[in-house]
Amino acid sequence: MAAGQSNQAVGAGSARSTRPLLIRGADLLTMDGTAGELPATDVLVQDGKIAAIGRRLSAAGAEVVEASGMILMPGMHDGHRHLWHAIDTGARVKTDPRNYAGYQKWKMAMMVAMTVEDHHLVALIGGLQAIDSGVTSIIDFPHAHYSLDRAEAAARGLQASGIGGWCAFQLGVSADWAVGDTISLRRADAGRLGRTTEAHWAIAQHLRDAVFSDRDAPLQLALSPISNPVQPMPDVRAAYDRARAMGVGMVDIHVHKPATPAPEGYLGHRGSGIRDFHDAGLLGPDFHISHGTQLDADELALMRDAGAMITSTAMGEIPYIAEGRGAPVFARARAAGVAAGIGVDVVLSLTQDYFEHIRTAYWSLFEEAESRKIAATYTSTDMLDFATALGARSLRLGDVTGSIALGKRADLVLLRTDRIGFAAGGSLADRVVNFAARQDVDSVWLGGVARKRHGRMLGVDWADMKARLAAAQARARRDAATVRFD
Ligand SMILES: [Zn+2]
């Protein structure tokens, strides 16, 4: 795709509620540049979209939510999450680095221990957990879906959660081992970072046609065209061209600078590979990457010019700093004009309280000289931007969600402020960025449809889900333990 194309959204539609919704008297944290923060203001939602913002609004037949003293903000965005990890959350945590070091082995054993039903369950739970925390759009990057039935079950689970954003499919994971096998680490790694085969393309096509055929739905298919980081550029180009020819609206990969440059003609020959993508004509407004902690100013400029997007996962990336692998790049990216957002990444290990991720992202800025300078110019609104308005742009949804503005989809989060510890002073952004927590999320609407009210998810029996997850987890762990690597 050519550089400079508009970052136009795909999948602008949503499940529609026919009855108007009037949220009355909330303090509005609009994250809309011109509107800013509006005390005690009403918001009217019609046909899933924000229809009016003002004082003393009324609408015949509207459901009225009295929200005086509460904070209404846009639904939040997460551009990089591995929801399938929910099968075993806590089994490896970053606060136990020696145990976490076994992450790839865990992954390779767990991916064959999980059943098709497990994939549906964890994707559904993962989507619901995100909504519960105030996150209304995500990019789910599932790197364990090595068969059509697994990929489809997970896609349908995520879709059933109702969350918006992108369900990515990684073209390249394979697993020719099974529960009870002893395999060489080399063979397992070759599967985890596998080459793309016709079988992968067939899965992608099936997902597009059978699961994501409605191009107006809030959740759309994204493709991850390469999973093996060391590939000849002609292969990379062929994979991106083919993915785009399928008509998907997003191509998304992990980007890490190779420890030693790849050979000439291979992706990662220069820097983190962005220049290789650029020279091959592969950057574009559908081009999204995660991490990229070592991107330099030239690489960021190439991304900006192409309208490309990036997500930093600060909590998970902070350990990279000690390893000399760079620091979270989101502030440098934003300063360079790139649509940059944040994300949770490793659901296996990290909290889903998204406010903690926003705070951690801020503090991570002090670990790198240029970011430290940028942080000195910030207000709390700049920080919240990564999770809301700019966060939406980093998911190619900037025209659809991310702020409370007329015509935007009504993806809204209503926060209680009455908990002791939730600050009463400061701007709304100051209070949310520094003091809000998941338990303050009173209500969440997606496209104007209530999914959480009075602190409880609607139509979700958490106790039942937890019991089903616990049973799946126990069985999958038992089976994963029988896979041995030598
Ligand atoms: Zn990741």
Image: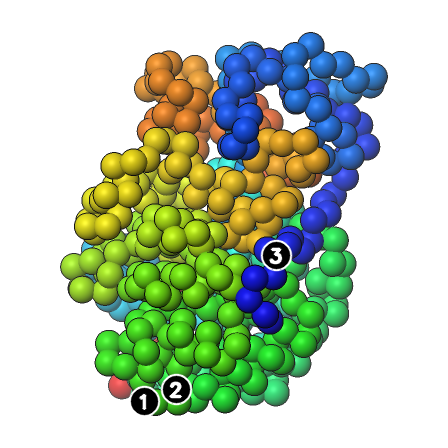
Q: Which residue is mark 3?
A: 6
The numbered mark, 1 or 3, whose residue comes first in the sequence reads: 3
Q: Residue at x 18, y 64 (%)?
A: 324
Q: Residue at x 43, y 52 (%)?
A: 337
Q: Identify which amino acid the numbered label 2 is placed on.
A: Tyr
The dot on residue 105 is none
The image shows residue 372 at horizontal and vertical percentages of: 22, 44
Q: Answer yes or no: do the residues labelled 2 and 3 have beta carbons within 8 Å?
A: no
Q: Residue at x 33, y 82 (%)?
A: 269
Instruction: Give the CA distance from mark 2 to mark 3.
Output: 29 Å
Which secondary structure, mark 1?
A: loop
Q: Which residue is mark 2?
A: 266
Most extreme residue toward the top, as rendered?
Answer: 56
Residue 477, above or below 203: above
Q: Answer yes or no: do the residues labelled 2 and 1 have beta carbons within 8 Å?
A: yes
For discs 2 and 3, the disc positioned in front in the rendered view: 3
Which secondary structure, mark 3?
A: loop
The image shows residue 94 at horizontal and vertical percentages of: 26, 55
On the image, which quarter does residue 150 sit in?
Answer: bottom right
Q: Answer yes or no: do the residues labelled 1 and 3 have beta carbons within 8 Å?
A: no
Q: Which residue is mark 1?
A: 263
Which secondary structure, mark 2?
A: loop
Closer to the camera in the image, 385 or 80: 385
The image shows residue 220 at horizontal and vertical percentages of: 65, 58
The image shows residue 75 at horizontal and vertical percentages of: 55, 37
Q: Is residue 171 visible?
A: no
Instruction: Give the CA distance from mark 2 to mark 1.
Output: 6 Å
Q: Identify which amino acid the numbered label 1 is placed on.
A: Pro
